[in-house]
Amino acid sequence: MTQRAKIDTDSGGTAGNGPPVEHRPAGLTSAEVAERVARGEVNDVPVRSSRSAVDIVRANVFTRFNAIIGVLWVIMLFVAPIQDSLFGFVIVANTGIGIIQELRAKKTLDGLAVIGEAKPTVRRDGTAAELSTSEIVLGDLIELGPGDKVVVDGVVAEAESLEVDESLLTGEADPVVKKPGDPMMSGSFVVAGGGAFTATKVGREAYAAQLAEEASRFTLVQSELRTGISTILKYVTWMMVPTATGLIISQLVVKDTNLKDSIARTVGGIVPMIPEGLVLLTSVAFAIGVVRLGRKQCLVQELPAIEGLARVDVVCLDKTGTLTEGGMDVTDLRPLGTDPDEAYVRKVLGALGASDPHPNASLQAIIEAYPEPDGWRCAEALPFSSARKYSGATFDEGGGGESSWLLGAPDVLLAEGDPALAETDHLNERGLRVLLLARTDRGARRPRAAEAARPAALVVLEQRLRPDASDTLAYFADQNVAAKVISGDNAVSVGAVAGSWTCRGRRTRWTPARSPRSGRRWRRCWRRTRSSAGSPRSRSGTWWRRSSRRGTRSR
């Protein structure tokens, strides 16, 4: 079992009330790792993707229906031939369907948990290598880049414009800038920059592991069908007591039958009161639905989930990864003026892409579109920061010339009223992302570099749309299911992307929710409104807001 780590991060960079956490650039040695493994200081939190096999069997065996039929079956086996006890095999069929389906789902989920496991880069003996999260030990030096998850608690050892999103833990959507000595909480992830941190809490002592343990209590899916059947069985149980008493008395007293035959006939008289066919038919219908969904590559954990899916009337969607794919493509390059020319701008973009060791999605698209020019050397680089909304670099162009460039949001790098802003707004309305390439004479890393920026070109990026998104939204429309897109991106851009699909002749309108409080970042949510069948008037749209802190929504 994992031992309790003695290092704490109550004050950034310190181990409890003791000395600061030592930064070792080369990481732990192999001997130190083996010593910590022997002490049990490893990140051995078990991955619980579903219920255990014992819980699955217990939940499907110990039911009200099985209890009633099971008791009558056992009695019948003692007082009558086996052919009179065939009704009891409905327990085997009904229970088997539920157990087999959930065990299959458990096996698949456990496999997916292993496939989707984060592989952090850990530095040991001066060499960085990807390891499983279960191999991390106390004191490991873990490297971070954009998109990387923080898998254990620790203290920042190295930071280069490192920004971390802790919204899953604190509810605050704004990225947090981290510096050496600042604490890192597991469950957060890097949104910009890079760095490394030293693990100070592993296993069940990590913050995310404690949250997961508290939130991992399993609850059954609410099923109105099963609830209704259970209610029927409850009343049948009460009715069976006087009925069975009357039957056995009539058999013993009136007809003077022996005790064995009287019990057998009593059981045979009350078994038809139990809706065996209804219970079995419900399980079979659920099982057929599971098989049909399985052919569509859909995994069902519990049989009643089929009923819940049939009752869905609203689907909330994320934009990135759901309606669009993760990557982006450069669709256009628009130089602003004749100096510099487009060929030179392409070289600058290629050099900027090569200057960042941890590119984000936008810069990765630029890297794929423009190769690194020959003879250019990066003298200094400024990684992207969501706080300043631009990145930059200073280059030695090889012939003695030196230039500094910035790449970022046009509304930050351009002066108010610049004609290029109007062009940028027009592109945003079409669902495109626009970056501005600007030249500066102050150096990329110097303060107020953006104030001296001279616009050179607009880089137009387009998100890769999923090819099956249109058919999916059309299916939801046919089923009278409302679709909502939740995104923190630009409201106009998201609305343009969401409205680019045509749902089989129905008009589609997306209305962004406005933020009611300045200074706080609210997630925007759109609800599509469709035209009424046979009527040219579209129904009034309803927009929703959701707070990233408290999870409340207003209407």
Image (cartoon, helix red, strand yellow):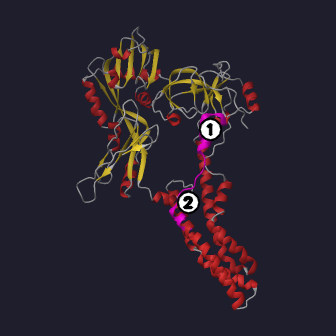
Q: Based on the picture, tell me whether residue 205 belongs to the magenta stretch.
A: yes
* Three-letter code, disc 2: Leu
Residue drawn at 59 percent across, 54 percent down: 105
Disc 2 secondary structure class:
loop
Give the residues in magenta: 204-229
Residue 33 in sight: yes
Residue drawn at 68 percent across, 55 percent down: 54
Q: Is residue 76 above or below residue 6?
A: below
Tell which tag, 1 or 2, sits nearer the viewer. 1
Residue drawn at 66 percent across, 55 percent down: 55
Q: Quadrant of residue 434?
A: top left
User: Of the numbered discs in the image, which one, if any, rests on residue 303?
Assistant: 2
The front one of 247 and 418 is 247
First along the sequence among labels 1 and 2: 1
The front one of 47 and 227 is 227
Residue 400, image x, y percentages: 41, 8
Give left or right: position of 391 versus 197.
left
- Circle 2 packing at 10 Å, graded few (<14), some (14-19), many (20+), is many
| Predominant secondary structure, magenta span | helix
Disc 1 secondary structure class:
helix
Residue 78, image x, y percentages: 76, 77
Residue 132 in sight: no
Q: Based on the picture, tell me whether residue 515 belongs to the magenta stretch.
A: no
User: Of the numbered discs in the image, which one, if any, rests on residue 210?
Assistant: 1
Give left or right: position of 120 versus 366.
right
Give left or right: position of 428 versus 308.
left
Contact between marks 1 and 2 (CB within 8 A): the answer is no
* Three-letter code, disc 1: Gln
